[in-house]
Amino acid sequence: MSTLIQNRPAARAARTPMVVRLLVLATFVVILNETIMINAIPRLMDSLHITEQSAQWVSTAFMLTMAAVIPVTGWFLQRVTTRAAFATAMGVFLAGTALAAVAPSFEMLLIGRIVQASGTAVMMPLLMTTLMTVVPESDRGRVMGTVTLAMSVAPALGPAVSGLILQAGSWRLLFVVVLPIAGVVTLVGLRLVRNVGEPRVGTIDWPSVTLAALGFGGVVYGLSMFGGSGEIGLGIGIVAGGLLAIVVFVFRQFRLQRTGTPLLDLRTLRHRTYVLSLAAMSIGFLAMLGSMILLPLYLQHLRGLSPLQTGLLVMPGGLAMGLLGPSVGKAFDRFGSRPLVLPGSIGIALALAGFTQVSTTMPYWQVLALHTLLMVSLAAAFTPLFTLGMGALPPHLYSHGSSILGTLQQVAAAFGTALVVTVMSARASHLLAGGVAAVPAQVSGIKLAFAVATALALVMIFVAAKLPRRVPPAES
């Protein structure tokens, strides 16, 4: 693709391009909002007089919108300039944040979250596509390390940040605090971001848009229902309908690849290294989101910690993950993927296995150590996987590859949440029916849920062992 308009001397080529730095900052701000409402559920219930099931929609609707919108971004990013995509994404995000901050009712808050998510859905593929275009292959690992901060650490820090903000007052502060920060990032970005590549003219296939929204959105929505009592049957039906829509969507993309322009170019899946990286990243993201659901339940419901105390306990792991990103990226540039991804996958499995031993008396330092090990291991795996997977694609497929990655992250998050909550609830209910006390039954349910997550992490080790050290010449 074309070079960056903001030209730099060759001697400074090793520095992270300004356009990437600004997009990383913007992406961090918007992705942080995906999980920032987790700790605000009780406040929402009291303030807006809604049930817990209704309040959960502030997170579910965000994730659902992301899953429905991200598949369209591959087409969108190829047809607008970098500045136009940035302005659109941040403008929509700001509008949604402002609406949520002043929402007089739960329905308006939900609309604000949907608008927020629509802007967020564009930022991650925009960041990945731009990075792969402007950063030389020999330096991508180092730069991708900073991207880890936005794509992986932001969701991990969301609950901790919200716990701190909620100590100061209403749930509205979660949006009031974000709004000026996002506004400043937008203004600075509009001044300094330069266009990367040239947009291409093309029409959009609206049936594909509809199928993508129904398919990926349906799967995420159906999976989100698995935690509700009596809704598992309906959830299975919706997931099945979503999967059917995805099958039709896939066949339509294959046809459009021969006769026109597909909405999501599935020729990305012909590249073995990309597919393996995609599988490993999805499992890793599932493990991270699953632990993010289970740990607050364990720490707050069974150990009696406040949201703030819970946030502070898990914050070191999230910070360690972010700080290690650049170092892991440099190590990837030097040594390749396998020396990082394989130990990282083993560390993920060990951390999750350690959590299968939780109890009402486990020392908090052990919880902190296991969570930190999990986050550090995820950092060791994510940066090389992002870099290796995207590097296996030809430049004209970067935007589509990043869109598929973002979509599967949302599906993995929904699946991880549904899986651990369903396993935990089923185990606890079975023990309660057998006469076991409530607390031991809940502890046993959490243990089994972590055991299932550990089994999935073992699959990640198997996938990691098959990854090449670097992109094979046939795929580069």
Image: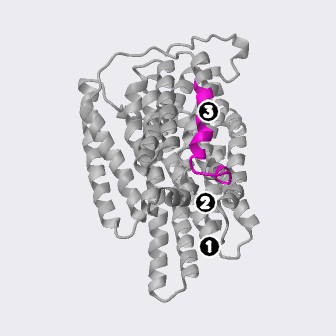
Residue hosting label 2: 349
Does the CB distance between marks 2 and 3 fall below 8 Å? no
| Label placed on residue 302 | 1
Q: Nearer the viewer, mark 1 or mark 2?
A: 1
**166 and 354: which is toward the camera:** 166
Q: Which residues are magenta?
A: 165-186
Q: Nearer the viewer, mark 2 or mark 3?
A: 3
**182 and 267: which is toward the camera:** 182
- In the figure, 200 relative to 167: above or below? above
Using residue 369 as the reference point, say whether residue 404 is left or right of it. left
Q: Amino acid at mark 3?
A: Pro
Q: Nearer the viewer, mark 1 or mark 3?
A: 3
Residue hosting label 3: 180
Q: CA distance from mark 1 to mark 3?
A: 37 Å
First-in-chain label (1 vs 2): 1
Q: Residue at x 51, y 13 (%)?
A: 2
